[in-house]
Amino acid sequence: MDFEVRRDSWGIPHLRAADARALAYAQGHNAAVDRAWQIEVERHRALGTTAAFLGVDAVGWDTFARQARLDDTARRCFRRLADEDPETAAWLTAYAEGVEAGLARGAAVAPEFAATGLAPGGWRPWTPLGVWLSTHILFAGFPAKLWRDATARRLGPGAVDLFAADGTGTSGSNGWLVAGGRTGTGHAVIAGDPHRFIEDPGVYQQIHLVCPEFDVIGLAVPGVPGLAHFGHTGTVAWAITNAMADYQDLYRERLRRVGGGVEAFGPDGWEAVAVHTETIEVAGAEPVRIEVVETERGPVVIDSYDGDGDGDGDGRDVLGEGVWAAVSLRYPPRVTHDLGFSALPALLRARTVADVDRALDGWAEPVNVVQAADTDGGLLHRVAGRVPVRHADNGRRTVPAWDPAYAWHGRHGPMPRAEVGDRGTAVMANQRGLAAPFGVEFAPPYRADRIQELLDADHTWTAKDMAAIHMDTRLPSARPLLDLLAGLDGLSDRAARLRERLLGWDRRMAAGSREAMAYAEVRGAVVRRFADHPELAPVAQLPDVPQVFRPWLALAPRVAFALETLLTTDRFPGVDRPALVRAAVEEVAAGAPGAVPWGEAHRLTPWRALPDPDPDPDAEPGPALAGDHDCVLCTSSLPAVTDRCARGPAARYVWDLARRDDSLWVVPLGASGAPGPHQRDQLPLWLRGELVPVITDWNLLLPEPPAVAARPVVHAQVVDGFGTVRIRPVDPDADHALLHAWLSPERARFWGMTGQSREQVRRTYAHLDSLDTHHAFLMFRDEESAALFQTYEPTADRVSECYQVEPGDTGIHLLIGPGPAEGARGHTATLVDVFLTYVLADPAVRRVVAEPDAANTKALTRLARSGFTLGPEVVLPEVDLPEVHIPAKRARLAFFSAPPPRPRTP
């Protein structure tokens, strides 16, 4: 399909096509080009196949994804969509087709594919639904019900509410709407920031979508078409926060084997259930076979469970002969076969608040609080999503599958909404508000109250003013600990001085504040002592649950996020709270409290699907951050576990309804997920609280150069047992991103181009391409890029100053590319043999000369094994090319003058 791509100076894609379907294709194609690795990981997460290329650490997720039937649910949702809304189904199909068409180009510039051996591709029309499911299946935090089970059993039912907080596995947001009567333009402003795990690449992609039906800017989820959460059509804008609703249930199941099948005990007695086995392939380890069971309630996600109090600890064979306990998950899309995706194209076409409202009537998951405003003064503040009607206990704990009292009975509706006057404001920060009837645990009100306090100031607001709210670092939740600290007696002199510092602190978690660091140290010590106290010992040991659920059951984070309640309750009479705080303060005071500013410890640590296999211990840590969990600038760490931050604002936005191009936005890293200038160029602004201007004027955007067709193959050779090796000339425009990914890492330091930008690499190879004396080639093993080599005439190179050039000499450079076969037996040797076969096929070439760095023992050994004779060490002089400075190098010469060797079989 035809479409046009332009970009602004931040690399943000602007896509234009002839109709909505062609535009969906363009959005999919762009996602594949800019975010190929990211969206392929998400596709495999939905399928439960990530361990095949990420290894044993991914088995836990893959097991859950398969047992929860994520891919099968996505297929069922798409089938229903195709029956009831074929236009949206076709729109999704076009997106998936666009992804497939763009993946080869995107994968070529994403080094992770070569590092893992992952072959891209396999997108189907339902894949975006699967990506959405896998991204949001844990959003409602249903594993917290396992924590409540354990707490009620071990500490008593009254202890459950003491730990209620915005737990470690949930995600939230700040969002606020300022009506036109409070702004300088007379039109509304919507602003906020979604709080999610900070991922590399980022979970949100800034994008602009244009066709005759609509013209929308917003934040897309890569792998999913449209703009579900945040968008601005020019006449109406919308944004969401997590409603903290509870809409997924866990049922305690009783299972037994009968013949070759499995039965579950339901309200009507024993009933047959669906069961089959699947195999999870694991890179570097043996495959793992799992059993997939689904009852009438839902798929079984915990194979054995001792959470109902009648077990002996292992959950199996404790309920009678051959009967064991398990847990099934019931979630709306699995029941209704509907994810609400018909709302997505409707949002793109929205022109008014009423249009947004109608579109969201069909929304399903996750459940959100929506704020919207239009240019006619319309305002909207409502809950959107699907919440089942069932017993109140379903939301608090696991419930018995055999009791009909806990069955579902339709859905709640209509969803709550609130009026916003023309001089009013609306704030939602995951607190107990509009969605209160549907939730159990909500975020403390600190963020919402602080935002409202700032908005209530006597001020006429503008879009640019919103950054000050985004970056507010005041920490109201420090009060209970500081109040206890103020009342302590018997402190040592050092502890008393520390107390005075903290009581005089402005309670702002500023990156440069040493008092904030000292407070964090005391808080961490208090959390550790509380979590280690004998009164909490019964919940210190994690229940035996699958790996994916364990973060919800870890005690120290639970204590940390419920610290205000735990410091003020008398529920634990054995805990002497003043004594505990006194001991923590003395502990911290004995060291050097606040020796470094808060930002030195509180550093950004984004999640990556593929961690660095060989991290540099001397590498700089992530950037310093201000803020904390209960600040408006919500940059969360885990007190007593780590001060590093992995969760925070995954984007910031300001939608201006007066003029869309006065809107602002920023993401934590950059617009692109591929190595290059736009992979992390927004990070400095994000850290400072600055925002990027929104640009929608097509004339101000830069046309994206068309993809350049690969140059023709100049040599192909079939090697038995190895594959087909092809050689083609490097095309600087088409190949520079791949070359940059190969030449930038430390492993390629002897090539002398580490630290160069992708554009510098392109210019360097464009310069070489312009010469008659120097040539660069790429080698491919079957379809995988495998090596870079260059040839040159020694008389036109600095090496001529170091030895006596003979007629027929040809110089070479060779770099074996990173990939799954690198280091495999025979891989390098065969590539060198084919390379020499090609070079020496020219009858004018009599001798091949190499000059690797003298310290590159690996290259020297490789050359010697391939038949080169090692010569003397020399010093190559420095050279200045038009685009790069080549420093002097101590090299060792090597010569090959034998006839072409026969290719070896590995």
Image (cartoon, helix red, strand yellow):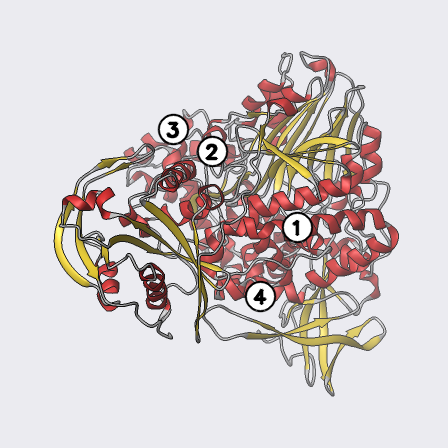
Q: What kind of residue is marked 1? A: His
Depth check, mark 1 against mark 4: the one in front is 1
Depth check, mark 4 against mark 2: the one in front is 2
Mark 4 to mark 3 CA distance (whole Å): 41 Å
- Residue 75's x, y, as percent? 75, 60
Q: Are marks 4 and 3 in contact (CB under 8 Å)?
A: no
Mark 1 to mark 4 CA distance (whole Å): 20 Å
Q: Is residue 489 above or below residue 387?
A: above
Depth check, mark 2 against mark 3: the one in front is 2
- As drawn, is 269 to the left or to the right of 896? right
What is the secondary structure assignment of the residue under circle 2?
Answer: loop
- The C terminus sits in image quarter: bottom left
Q: Residues within 10 Å of mark 1 (few under 14, many from 20)?
A: some
Q: Are marks 1 and 2 in contact (CB under 8 Å)?
A: no
For disc 2, the marked residue is 681
Give whichever of 594, 679 is nearer the camera.
679
Q: Is residue 423 above or below residue 474?
A: above
Q: Quadrant of residue 372?
A: top right
- The N terminus sits in image quarter: top right
Mark 2 to mark 3 CA distance (whole Å): 23 Å
For disc 3, the marked residue is 512
For disc 1, the marked residue is 136
What is the secondary structure assignment of the residue under circle 4?
Answer: loop
